[in-house]
Amino acid sequence: MPTITVPEALALRLQQHALAQHQSVETLAISLLTSALDTAIDPQLLTVVQRIQSSPPNPIQIRPALGSLAAQLHDDQGSDSTIGREWDVAWQEAEAMIHNMNIDASTDEELR
């Protein structure tokens, strides 16, 4: 098996994380490297993103504004208040779900 030499500061960080996760340094390093290699960005995707970013804007797709966004958001006289209440309820449910997921994740971390 090949040996990898890492800078002292990185080795210290690996040791600290391994200790906190109750793993050996080798196990943690293998896990981190495997995860990094498995989630590598597809070069074709990077090429597409670079092409999009380097493309100049198409003037045909740019339309002038038809009023003030702030005024439109402020003036919601004709909107249905039921939709706003439903949105608030749905948002609170989503926030609660995220909160519970964070609690579950932190509990899992503590158990390691």
Image: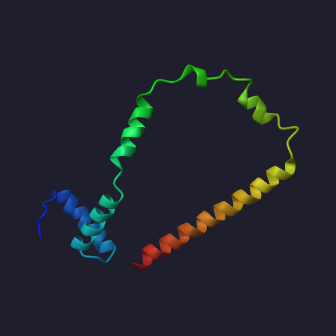
In the image, is 46 to the left or to the right of 29?
Answer: right
Q: Where is residue 5 drawn, in percent x and y?
A: 12, 60
In the rendered picture of this protein, how many numbered marks are placed on residues? 0
Residue 66: where, in percent of width, then height? 73, 23
Residue 72 x %, y % = 77, 32
Q: Is residue 60 left or right of residue 18?
A: right
Query: Quick one: 87 or 64, which is closer to the camera?
Result: 64
Q: Nearest the camera: 46 or 90?
A: 46
Which residue is at 87% across, 37% downward?
Answer: 77
Residue located at (86% from left, 48% from top):
81
- Position of the N terminus, as image quadrant, is bottom left
Q: Residue furthest bottom?
A: 111
Question: Relative to 69, is 57 on the left or the right?
Answer: left
The residue lying toward the viewer, choosing from 93 and 55, is 55
Q: Name the spot of residue 36 as percent of width and height, x first.
A: 31, 59
According to the image, what is the colour scheme of the structure? rainbow
20 lies above or below 63: below
Q: Residue at x 25, y 67 (%)?
A: 29
Q: In this rendering, would 32 be left or right of 6?
A: right
Asked which quadrant contains residue 50, the reply is top left
The answer to which quarter of the image holds residue 7 is bottom left
* Residue at screen point 39% across, 45% down: 45
Front one among 19 and 36 = 36
Question: In which quadrant of the rendered image does the C terminus lie?
Answer: bottom left
